[in-house]
């Protein structure tokens, strides 16, 4: 019969317990090259020791740099997280320090003291102030300001624009996508205008503007010989003044009270170029609409850098918005836009050189539909163009806003057309004014959210 080993097991257990107690009591010691460490039998159930409380410094790359311990600090300061909330298509910031809009956010803090200007470049998608008007109204409601900003001398569809009344006659028009002349350098809008005899251009406030008057009127021109301008205010008050003779851009400032209309007529117009006029108050936000049909954005490289610089000396733009792409994409496109990427990178780098203190946002292409295999649906190349534009923004280290995503993605333009009332025209490309208001709100929401996130993360110094 097998012998019972119970007593031997009990004696072994007692020996092990005795050795553990002794090892827990004895201090750590060394014998020659051997080291013995005190055993903590309760280590598995004890709480981890509390580390010294540290103050964190948040770097511009969203990492944490730890400084020396500071006593009696109640909690660790941790950067809050700001995910993009539902309903907002957030900006994508490709700048190295994630501060692509720093110049603009810094400038708007003084909008109650001086004018802050935004240049909104685009194609027919924003023609007639169809999107930029509501965008302007939103920002002016927050930061102040009254006026539509820059308006060219002539327009392809003056009655289409409802934010200002505009009439003109007897002008020669040069543009990035039309007739050009080496003696007539194009202005910041991509246009230049040469007056003929009996020329005139007249502006009146929009019928919707309240109050219906202009505060300040600024006329932009370049004059190399003895030319003069006659301007008539409110159809009755006539002023005649010589224009400054110069090879550079000049401006005529009109600050009369209660201007309800202004008409310009130019005498001795030889060697005179007129670019446009700006309508604004003395402070607040102003959005200049630089729309041009058929422009892919590449043409901006054809504007002389020196003339752009002269415009910026007078305007001091703090934000540039670039909306392009629709004039490149077609239903049968090969979808290889590497050539477009190369050219637009050059354009944006030029803009960054000329406007070094200006934030830049590239707005991605909108949704557009066509007849694809017998069915109206999003043109496949739209996605490719959108992705290419994101790569352009990344390569030039500016901000990007995904308009395609903001609209709702694939086939969203079809929903816009089918809406009641319609948000887009039946060409499945262009917005109605109601659609423009919808997109303008989304763009404004994205920028205002980014400003709040920026100010919270790293207040402007």
Image: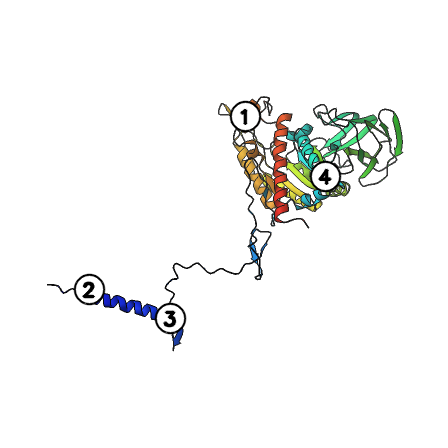
Q: Is residue 120 left or right of residue 30?
A: right
- State the mark number for residue 117: 4
- The residue that label 1 is drawn on is 415
Q: Quadrant of residue 295?
A: top right
Residue at left offset 79%, top offset 30%: 214
Q: Residues within 10 Å of mark 4 (few under 14, many from 20)?
A: many
Q: Is residue 376 left or right of residue 308?
A: left
Q: Position of residue 259 (x, y in %)?
A: 82, 29
Answer with mark 4 or mark 1, whichever residue precedes in sequence: 4
Q: Is residue 75 left or right of residue 200?
A: left
Answer with mark 3 or mark 4, whichever residue precedes in sequence: 3
Q: Position of residue 273 (x, y in %)?
A: 80, 34
Answer with mark 2 or mark 1, whichever residue precedes in sequence: 2
Q: Residues within 10 Å of mark 3 (few under 14, many from 20)?
A: few
Distance CA(mark 1)–CA(mark 3): 78 Å
* Residue 176 in view (yes/no): no
Q: Residues within 10 Å of mark 1 (few under 14, many from 20)?
A: some
């Amino acid at each position: 019969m097998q012998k019972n080993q119970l007593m031997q097991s009990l004696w072994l257990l007692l020996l092990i317990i005795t050795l553990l107690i002794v090892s827990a009591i004895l201090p750590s010691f060394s014998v020659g090259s051997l080291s013995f460490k005190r055993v903590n039998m309760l280590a598995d159930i004890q709480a981890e020791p509390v580390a010294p409380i540290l103050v964190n410094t948040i770097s511009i790359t969203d990492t944490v740099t730890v400084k020396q311990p500071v006593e009696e600090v109640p909690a660790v300061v941790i950067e809050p997280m700001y995910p993009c909330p539902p309903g907002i298509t957030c900006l994508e910031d490709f700048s190295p320090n994630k501060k692509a809009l720093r110049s603009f956010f810094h400038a708007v803090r003084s909008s109650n003291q001086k004018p802050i200007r935004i240049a909104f470049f685009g194609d027919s998608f924003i023609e007639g102030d169809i999107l930029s008007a509501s965008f302007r109204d939103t920002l002016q409601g927050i930061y102040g300001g009254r006026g539509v900003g820059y308006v060219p001398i002539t327009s392809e569809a003056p009655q289409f624009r409802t934010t200002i009344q505009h009439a003109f006659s007897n002008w020669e028009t040069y543009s990035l996508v039309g007739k050009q002349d080496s003696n007539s350098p194009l202005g910041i809008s991509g246009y230049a205008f040469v007056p003929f005899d009996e020329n005139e251009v007249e502006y009146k406030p929009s019928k919707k503007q309240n109050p219906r008057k202009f505060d300040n009127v600024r006329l932009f021109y370049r004059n190399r010989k003895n030319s003069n301008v006659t301007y008539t205010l409110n159809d009755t008050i006539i002023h005649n003044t010589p224009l400054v003779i110069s090879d550079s851009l000049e401006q005529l400032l009109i600050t009369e009270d209660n201007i309800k209309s202004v008409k310009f007529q130019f005498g001795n117009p030889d060697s005179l170029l007129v670019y446009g006029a700006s309508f604004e108050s003395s402070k607040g936000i102003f959005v200049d609409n630089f729309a041009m049909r058929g422009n892919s954005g590449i043409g901006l490289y054809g504007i002389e850098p020196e003339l752009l610089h002269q415009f910026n000396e007078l305007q001091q733009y703090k934000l540039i918005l670039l909306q392009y792409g629709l004039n490149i994409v077609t239903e049968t496109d090969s979808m290889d836009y590497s050539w477009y990427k190369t050219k637009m990178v050059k354009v944006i780098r030029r803009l960054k050189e000329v406007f070094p203190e200006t934030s830049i946002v590239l707005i991605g292409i909108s949704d557009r539909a066509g007849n694809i295999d017998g069915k109206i649906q999003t043109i496949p190349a739209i996605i490719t163009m959108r992705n290419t534009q994101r790569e352009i923004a990344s390569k030039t280290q500016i901000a990007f806003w995904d308009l395609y995503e903001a609209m709702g993605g694939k086939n969203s333009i079809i929903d816009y057309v089918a809406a009641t009332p319609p948000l887009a025209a039946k060409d499945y490309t262009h917005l109605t004014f109601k659609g423009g208001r919808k997109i303008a709100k989304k763009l404004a929401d994205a920028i205002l959210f980014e400003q709040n996130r920026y100010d919270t993360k790293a207040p402007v110094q």
